[in-house]
């Protein structure tokens, strides 16, 4: 977990950066793995993302 979570976090942030390059850009990042919500390392992954609006199970949440 010490190695794989930081690597996954970096790759996720890089993917988000490739999607959103300018202020006018918009996009959607979809994570289909429920472990992001149910496991401790999932919270670490979500916290590593920029402060985007999050929608979990159809409910929008503040970053």
Image (spheres, rainbow, N blue to C red):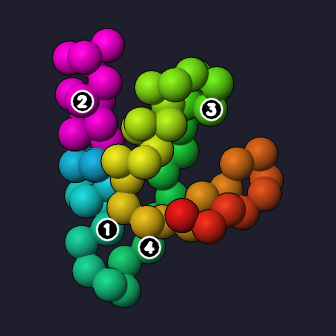
> Would you say the residues marked 3 and 2 are in contact, meaning their CB atoms lie under 8 Å apart?
no
Q: Residues within 10 Å of mark 1 (few under 14, many from 20)?
A: some
**Between discs 2 and 1, the one toward the N terminus:** 2
**Front-lying residue, 30 or 41:** 41
**Between discs 4 and 2, the one toward the N terminus:** 2
State whether residue 19 is above or below residue 24: above
Residue 3 percent coordinates (x, y): 20, 17
Residue 46's tag is: none
What secondary structure characterizes most of the magenta part? Answer: helix
Quadrant holding the N terminus? top left
Residue 6's tag is: 2
Q: CA distance from mark 3 to mark 2?
A: 17 Å
Q: CA distance from mark 2 to mark 1?
A: 21 Å
Residue, x 24% and y 72% (percent of image)? 21
Query: Residue under circle 3?
Result: 37
Query: Residue under circle 1?
Result: 20
Q: Is label 4 or label 3 in front?
A: 3
Q: Answer yes or no: is residue 27 visible.
A: yes
Query: Residue under circle 4?
Result: 26
Residue 22 colored in magenta in the image: no
Which image quadrant is residue 38 in? top right
**Between discs 3 and 1, the one toward the N terminus:** 1
Residue 24 percent coordinates (x, y): 36, 86
User: Which residues lie in the magenta part?
Assistant: 1-12
Q: Is label 2 or label 1 in front?
A: 2
Q: Residues within 10 Å of mark 2 (few under 14, many from 20)?
A: some
């Amino acid at each position: 977990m010490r190695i794989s979570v930081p690597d996954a976090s970096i790759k996720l942030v890089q993917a988000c950066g490739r999607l959103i390059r300018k202020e006018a850009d918009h996009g959607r990042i979809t994570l289909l793995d429920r472990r992001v919500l149910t496991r401790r390392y999932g919270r670490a992954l979500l916290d590593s993302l920029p402060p985007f609006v999050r929608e979990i199970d159809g409910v929008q949440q503040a970053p």
